[in-house]
Amino acid sequence: MLIVNFHEHPGYYAEENCRIYGIHKAVLLPVGNEMVGKAIEMAEKEPDKYIPFDWFDKDRPIEEELERIKNNINRHGIKGIKFQPMDQHIFPDDKRLYSLYELCQENGLVVTWHAGIVKLGFKYENGVPMLARYCDPLGFDQVAFDFPKLKICIAHLGGNYIYTALVLAEKHENIYLDTAFLTFFAPRFFPPVTVEDMIAHAVSVAGADKILYGCEGVTPEHVINSKISDTDKEKILGLNAVKLLGLQK
Ligand SMILES: [Zn+2]
């Protein structure tokens, strides 16, 4: 069965996760400008294995950022943009992002947006408070109306905002969810749940076509052991990603 990890970061762990879990392909999500080069470099070395995403720097002039990203689409085949809103201090429906969404929609790029309160030990990022509300994906309701063809992926099934994320994916054709890092969120619910419960529940609400396997502690076994059909397991573990990214199987 083809296994695509839709949520990986460039670096050592990407290779290790592929090896340990038998992952065939991984989407490399840079967190910060300095990781973009690494994602591209890894993908150029092993193009059948790695799919590079880009990063958006809101502190650079927007026109320059759009040019840079266009160049990376054409020269390096980047397939999406990763957002880490609690570090970037932005909300999904921030109008400053609209020209970027336009570019992504036109070029079929995926926007992967971190959701869920994490990094509990870090209170500040560059002197600015890391507010939990940046991790709430609700703003994508408006974005999905404004960009109906934009491919949106809310990470971590929305984390603690799972209810919001699931109804958004149920409501909008173009909103998807990844399963990364559920091992962090599952025990924090009341009552605590398992990763397998979260996956099965996501399938029952949003449908298996909307769920993408992401690792960060979540293994293919978690998906395989969830109470969902074999067809749904195949979709989540790889087929949905192939379709969304237009990959060769
Ligand atoms: Zn991540």
Image: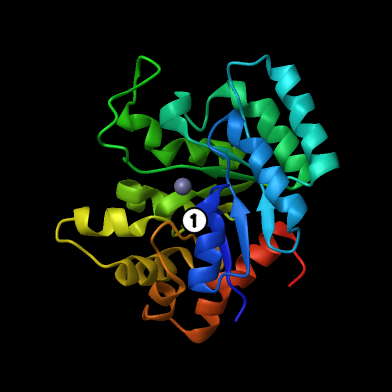
Q: Does the residue labelled 1 lie within 8 Å of ligand 1?
A: no
Q: Where is residue 70 in the image (x, y as percent from the top left)?
A: 80, 33
Q: Would you name the residue on which mark 1 appears? A: 177
Nearer to us in this view, 202 or 247: 247
Identity of the residue drawn at 33% across and 46% down? 161
Q: Where is residue 215 in the image (x, y as percent from the top left)?
A: 46, 60
In the image, is 176 to the left or to the right of 179? Answer: right
Can residue 192 be seen at all in this image of the molecule?
yes
Crowd rating for badge 1 (residues with CA inside 10 Å; few <14, some 14–19, many 20+): many
Q: Where is residue 23 in the image (x, y as percent from the top left)?
A: 56, 70
In the image, is 68 to the left or to the right of 117? Answer: right
Identity of the residue drawn at 72% across and 33% down? 102
Vertical comparison of 8 with 123: above or below: below
Give the residue type that dot 1 points to: Leu
Nearer to us in this view, 244 or 29: 29
Identity of the residue drawn at 53% across and 52% down? 12
Can residue 213 be seen at all in this image of the molecule?
no
Identity of the residue drawn at 43% across and 80% down? 224
Residue placed farthest to the left in the image? 191
Q: Where is residue 165 in the image (x, y as percent from the top left)?
A: 41, 50
Vertical comparison of 104 with 89: above or below: below
Nearer to us in this view, 152 or 73: 73
Q: How is the image coloured?
A: rainbow
Vertical comparison of 230 with 188: above or below: below
Residue placed farthest to the bottom in the image? 230
Q: In which quarter of the image is the C terminus?
A: bottom right
Vertical comparison of 98 with 214: above or below: above
Image-quadrant location for residue 179:
bottom left
At numbered mark 1, what does the secondary structure look like: helix, strand or loop?
strand
